Amino acid sequence: MAVMRSVFYVPSNNEKMVTKAPEIKADILTLDLEDSVPPAEKPKGRDKIQEYLKTSRAKQISSYLYVRINNWETQMTNDDLEAVVHPGLDGVCLAKCGSADNVRRLDWKLEELEQRRGMKVGSVAIQLLIETAKGVINAHAAATASPRVNSLIFGAV
């Protein structure tokens, strides 16, 4: 299993920060599509991530590239995944995960996108961001809902 001591988040809509992102020394570089990106800026953030995967991923110092995606209740998750699941992506961080069903749905969508894009099935890992009381109660079930889950991050509850 990968060593994940440090995770550095970069707002994906901030061109200046995304441009500097390859130089960041962290175990995981996470380009953010969730809370640091206002709703009106999400399409720009998705575009910046696609551009990053094509032009900057190979120059990245950090070992792994993840994207924090919006949770299913926002109805933005599919758009996030369609935009970011491409070769070079190592994982996604599912914000505000509340249940095992959230994880199973994500696993299914990742498999579909990996197959469609010629990627190895199972190559995109899942981190779960547990930020609600419901998420804490269901943390074990969520963590074991997919073999892709490699870590849980606990946020303010």
Image (tube, rainbow, N blue to C red):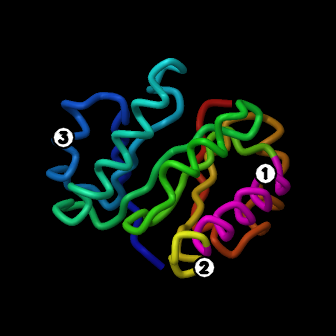
Q: Is residue 83 magenta?
A: no
Choose between 6 and 91: the one closer to the eye: 91
Q: Is residue 102 magenta?
A: yes
Residue 1: x and y, percent? 48, 79
Callout 1 crowding tier (Cα within 10 Å): few <14, some 14–19, many ≥20 = some
Camera-nearest label, 1 or 3: 3
Residue type at tag 1: Asn
Q: Mark 1 highlights which residue?
A: 102
Whole-Å distance between the Cαs marked 2 and 3? 29 Å
Residue 89: x and y, percent? 42, 63
Residue at 45% x, 63% y: name it. Answer: 86
Q: Indicate the secondary structure of the residue bearing disc 1.
A: helix
Residue type at tag 3: Thr
Callout 3 crowding tier (Cα within 10 Å): few <14, some 14–19, many ≥20 = few
Whole-Å distance between the Cαs marked 1 and 3? 32 Å
Q: Which residues are magenta?
A: 99-115
Residue at 58% x, 57% y: name it. Answer: 127
The image's mark for residue 19 is 3
Residue at 37% x, 41% y: name it. Answer: 9
Q: Mark 2 highlights which residue?
A: 121
Q: Indicate the secondary structure of the residue bearing disc 3.
A: helix
